[in-house]
Image: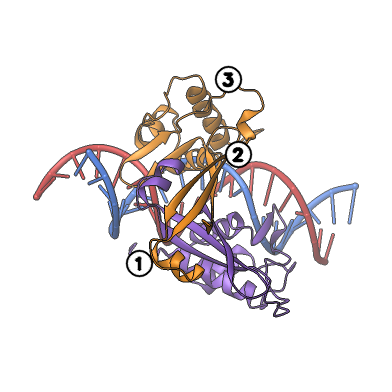
Chain colours: A orange, B purple, C blue, D red
Amino acid sequence: MPTPHYGQPRYRVIADKLRANIEAGLIPPGALLPPESTLSADYRASRGTIRQAIAALRQAGLVVTEHGRGTYARPRPLEQTRPADTTEPETRQRQIPAEADLAMLFEVRVGAALIEQETVMRNDGGVVRAVVRTYRLAD
Amino acid sequence: MPTPHYGQPRYRVIADKLRANIEAGLIPPGALLPPESTLSADYRASRGTIRQAIAALRQAGLVVTEHGRGTYARPRPLEQTRPADTTEPETRQRQIPAEADLAMLFEVRVGAALIEQETVMRNDGGVVRAVVRTYRLAD
DNA sequence: AGAAATTTGTCCGTATGTATC
DNA sequence: AGATACATACGGACAAATTTC
């Protein structure tokens, strides 16, 4: 068999099928995907091609892979309820005692009161993109 | 040659060397990198390994690749122009293992690699006004 | 315009290393 | 310690896009 990739390459096709299975709930969020060896047999593709497909899903944020363990479907493609809320950053504020590193920067004693403001930014899928923590003196 | 990847895998080492060459200006911005076949000979690595290294640079946004044409160094990653302005925020970036709280937010296991970017903002007198720490997933 | 050469893209098979169970 | 599963690396082959002659 040569390597004809008319239209879409095989790894793309396989990635799309896996994506469909995940989004359809056939592979529930948090569950392990079948191991690469099984997928290789199922889709009649080499392991390298399967890995390429999984890499595409990983880059799309649909799965996470852990060495020696497996590849998990991402918890929550979701939404529903709340129309525009998903892109809105969540912010929370609290008072904390200064750790050594922050105390040094602010030139206060360790344990001095600081205000920590934490903002969590997520993408449309609800996956955390970044966490921003801002520290100021309490006063 | 077997496959010993003690410490760092070969593709990582190669990627780092290429990155150094780019950032040192040895490969000027916008210029073509040597073709994969040449890199393969230069670094005594298979083409697949070279492609892995380039993929890492591409993901890092340092290069762009075009089918049939080649891989270009990206115009300007960052830095230069340091006007010694004391009120300018100082930013520093490093990789850290995820603490429990951040691991939970990012949905990774404790100890996973995170990028922490810390910016220290001072007033005219040099007193720290605020510290902003931004966390993202490494890679 | 067309053919050849160049260069990246895809795919396979195999072997071995490393992490987890 | 053994089995399972992902990671790295090699080599070869052919496809597809671009450039060159």
Q: Chain of mark 3?
A: A
Q: Nearer the viewer, residue A99 or A120?
A: A99
Q: Secondary structure at mark 2?
A: loop
Mark 2: amino acid: Pro
Q: Are marks 1 and 3 in contact (CB under 8 Å)?
A: no
Q: Position of residue C10 (x, y in %)?
A: 57, 42
Could you say which quadrant of the image residue A119 lies in?
A: top right
The numbered disc on residue A89 is: 2
Q: Earlier in the sequence, mark 2 or mark 3?
A: 3
The answer, for residue B45, to whether it is visible in the render is: no
User: Who's the residue at 42% across and 23% down the image?
Assistant: A28
- B104 with respect to B137 (left or right): left
Q: Residues within 10 Å of mark 2 (few under 14, many from 20)?
A: some
Q: Say which residue label 1 marks.
A: B7
Front disc: 1 or 3: 3
Q: Are marks 1 and 3 on the same chain?
A: no
Q: Are marks 2 and 3 in contact (CB under 8 Å)?
A: no
Mark 3: amino acid: Gln
Q: Nearer the viewer, residue B102 or C16?
A: B102
Q: Is residue A2 above or below residue D13?
A: above
Q: Position of residue B29 (x, y in %)?
A: 73, 69
Q: Secondary structure at mark 3?
A: loop
Q: Position of residue A66 (x, y in %)?
A: 37, 44
Q: Position of residue B17 (x, y in %)?
A: 53, 72
Q: Are marks 2 and 3 on the same chain?
A: yes
User: Who's the residue at 46% across and 62% down the image?
Assistant: B95
Q: Nearer the viewer, residue B138 or A104?
A: A104
Q: Residues within 10 Å of mark 1 (few under 14, many from 20)?
A: few
Q: Residue furthest front?
A: A139
Real-space Cα separation, disc 1 to disc 3, in angstroms: 45 Å
Q: Chain of mark 1?
A: B
Q: Say which residue label 3 marks.
A: A80
